[in-house]
Image: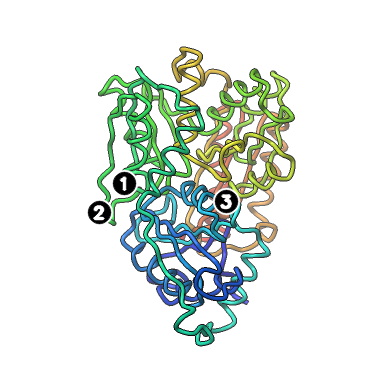
Amino acid sequence: MEKLFGTDGIRGQANRHPITADMALQVGKAMACAMGARGHGSKRAVIGKDTRLSGYMIETALTSGLVSMGADVFLVGPVPTPAVAHLTRSLAADAGIMVTASHNPFDDNGIKLFSPDGYKLDDAMEAEIARHVLSGPISSEHIRSDQIGKAYRIDDASGRYIEFAKSTIRNQKLDPLKIVLDCANGAAYHIAPLIFRELGAEVVKINVAPDGYNINNNCGALHPKVVAEKVREQKADLGIALDGDADRVIFCDAHGHTVDGDRILAMCALDFHRRGVLTKDTLVCTTMSNLGLHEAMTRHGIHVVTTDVGDRYVIDAMRMHGYAMGGEKSGHVIFHDYVTTGDGIITALQVMRLMRMKQATLASLAECMVEYPQRLVSLPVCEKRPLEELAQLSTIIQQAEAQMGSHGRVVVRYSGTEKKIRLLVEAREAEMVEQWIARLTEAVHAELGQG
């Protein structure tokens, strides 16, 4: 059977399978079936979206599918992904849906699904929804006209999330910090500036004029040089770059130097550890995190749990063992005492709280770890063959690992959302990193082609 869900919901090019209006209609119907909707008022779902043009199409089709099966829908408009997770809980809904392709270009879109407790749907529920969708068109004719669901526009959805976000640092004042905020022309373009301004920060906002096409376009978390240049120009204290759905964030310090998710995890984990609120003195990260993060945590007696790449795997480990903090180098950071998913705005609030509390610059806080030279490349490929079948690539990986020993590593994996392979090499010497990246790239091109 066709695989509908990837590592982060359903994703693809808008208006092409599986991101079509027809498929979204079926997904809405399937969700209603999975929730057990029996008629208007029996089950409720929250739907949010980012600023992509195709969001109108997908949002409307999902709504039609849900209400045709007797489920009610709360429409919250353009809001960050973590806001949908929060509102799903706040509104006591039975499911949450975010229409977004996160950091991807505007012509992609996707559907992220949340359970009533605000966590991303587990594999079993995704499989049930996929089974309903892929087994053929779902009929709604058994729902009579008086059982059809209703769709409500929640006008104060943004305000609810704004107050929640501020409460995570107890509405602490952030003045006199001056920040440059890059919203990537995405879902946080309206909400994020309000939150930081209401807490007293001086906000210089950029890329806050979405037009349906410009989300993530040479801006936001994937292009931190943009916010860095503005920070230097404005003589700001820090830069904050969100991605299209604001579930991840990358920073830069007052000098314009990038501060990624690993350094944020390190400084915040050390702060939580000192205050005695880092549950079980443990931090969760993925295989992509720098060895320097591991060394910094070990020096301070903090245990590190490593998961596969993907914030859902980080969150699964945190839920299973009750850990308080985890995240990814890419900027997904989860403060589990407050949120159920990565939240770029709340991460920024925690960083700014720490700066104010310690009366420290972001650059000085970021010095808590020494980063190994590392390079990550994403290569388009013609096909995604199992890695164990790639003899040349496997041989080079073994040779690299033998040479670097415990002072370096190689991570090779396919993208969960794109036809790409990711190559990560990390070592104590930058020259060694470049040497092995070149050889791995050559092997990928030879065995998988250049997509």
Closer to us: 236 or 437: 236
Tell me: 54 left or right of 259. Answer: left
The residue most toward the bottom is: 141
Q: Which mark is residue 185?
A: 1
**Disc 2 marks which residue?**
211
Marks 1, 3: nearer the viewer: 3
Q: Position of residue 320 (x, y in %)?
A: 73, 45
State yes or no: discs 2 and 3 in contact (Cβ < 8 Å).
no
The three-letter code of the residue at mark 1 reads Asn
Residue drawn where x is 39% and y is 36% of the image: 241
Q: Position of residue 207 (x, y in %)?
A: 28, 41
Residue drawn where x is 31% and y is 43% of the image: 190
Distance Cα–Cα, label 1 vs label 3: 25 Å
- Using a 10 Å C-alpha cutoff, classify the residue at mark 3 as few (fewer than 14 neighbours), some (14 to 19) or many (20 or more): many
**Disc 3 marks which residue?**
118
The three-letter code of the residue at mark 3 reads Gly
State yes or no: discs 1 and 2 in contact (Cβ < 8 Å).
yes
The three-letter code of the residue at mark 2 reads Asp
Residue drawn where x is 59% and y is 57% of the image: 115
Tell me: 300 left or right of 330. Answer: right
Q: Position of residue 420 (x, y in %)?
A: 51, 56
